[in-house]
Amino acid sequence: MKIGVPKEIKTLEFRVGMTPAGVHEVVHDGHDVVVETNAGSGIGVTDADYEQAGATVVASAQEVFDAADMIVKVKEPQLNECEMLRDDQVLFTYLHLAADPAQTEALVKSGTTAIAYETVTANDGSLPLLTPMSEVAGRLSIQCGAFALHKANGGCGKLLGGVPGVQPANVLVIGGGVSGANAADMAVGLGANVTILDRSLPRLRELDDVWGGRVHTVYSTGHAISELAPQSDLIIGAVLIAGAAAPKLVTAEHIKTMRAGSVVVDISIDQGGCFETSHATTHADPTYVVDDVVHYCVANMPGAVPRTSTYALTNATLPFVKSLANLGWKEALTRDPHLANGLNVHAGHVNHEAVAQDLGYKYLSAADALKAA
């Protein structure tokens, strides 16, 4: 199989879909890899590094897409990239389609087979290809939120951990999953007063045990958010429903009750955001203000630390890349139902139920798509 790795073109996105180590692995298995020039420059990897690993470096994305049987990326294809996809190609990357009707339409029109990292599952129900980026985004959310709290950045001027004689900031984390737990871990480490909301009592018990009572755990309801939002200096939105648009748990009315200069960070923005007042921003212009509350809603947060993020992501994706290359996508998905859960679009059909429901497409299951293929 010929595997293509284009340079990411989303605004200030510096990650790359494969590292030289990954290239070496698939080349060793007998496959060809085509990499766009400077694809790894954002993480300090040169064209020579890829060539030494066995890849062929080409001058343009068009050459990558023309040559490849499978495209391996990080972020969702931009619309001009969707136009380069073919119906005999496999696309393996993050998609987040429920929040992106234009991309979904373009992928459906292309006829390509699009497998989304974020909906591949594991035996325990977790999302192994989303987890590493959730870890990064969760930890980053506290750094970004703390920076946004600086007075010069529009915040109220609070230090998260306070100092002796001065109260620390109140941090509210909505969602106790991977990103929420990592956000709480960072906030606790900085000395903030941290509260986590979740709807799973077993998870709340687990989180309470992890921090030995240093984190307050509260069952998530609209009433709880109404009570806690006005007291919060920083709210982290870390809500996920796999493949589906994020629910708007924090309303515009909640935002109005917050103190001037408070900050909200919406980790869920890739899936449309869990704050009613959220809209996607970029690293070039990451924040905006609504009702005197600073909003940080960057849709590719881990792109801020691309070296850490790329290596964390490709550690997780490489076994699946090898499976798709060695077996072909049909056999790989047939043998691995968890990988089959990643199938979002194939041959003009939407194959993930939540995406189809949110965007109004007719749903064709992955099993039926495999039978048709």
Image: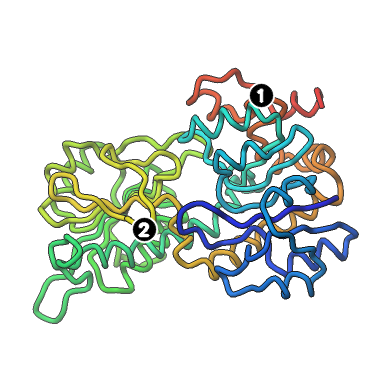
In terms of secondary structure, where does tag 1 sit?
strand
Q: For the residue marked with disc 2, what is the amino acid?
A: Ala
Residue at 52% over, 58% down: 133
Label 2, residues with CA under 10 Å away: few <14, some 14-19, many ≥20: few
Q: Residue furthest front?
A: 59
**71 or 224: nearer the eye?**
71
In terms of secondary structure, where does tag 2 sit?
loop
Q: For the residue marked with disc 1, what is the amino acid?
A: His
Tags 1 and 2 touching, CB below 8 Å: no
**18 or 36: nearer the eye?**
36
Residue at 18% over, 45% down: 290
Residue 262: percent from the left, percent from the top? 17, 56
Circle nearer the N terminus (1, 2) = 2
Residue 256: percent from the left, percent from the top? 13, 42
Residue under circle 1?
A: 349
348 vs 76: above or below: above
Residue under circle 2?
A: 284
Quadrant placement of the C terminus: top right
Say left or right for 115 vs 132. Answer: right
Residue at 11% over, 44% down: 257
Residue 246: percent from the left, percent from the top? 41, 37
Residue 156: percent from the left, percent from the top? 13, 62
Residue at 58% over, 44% down: 77
Disc number for residue 25: none
Q: CA distance from mark 1 to mark 2?
A: 35 Å
Label 1, residues with CA under 10 Å away: few <14, some 14-19, many ≥20: many
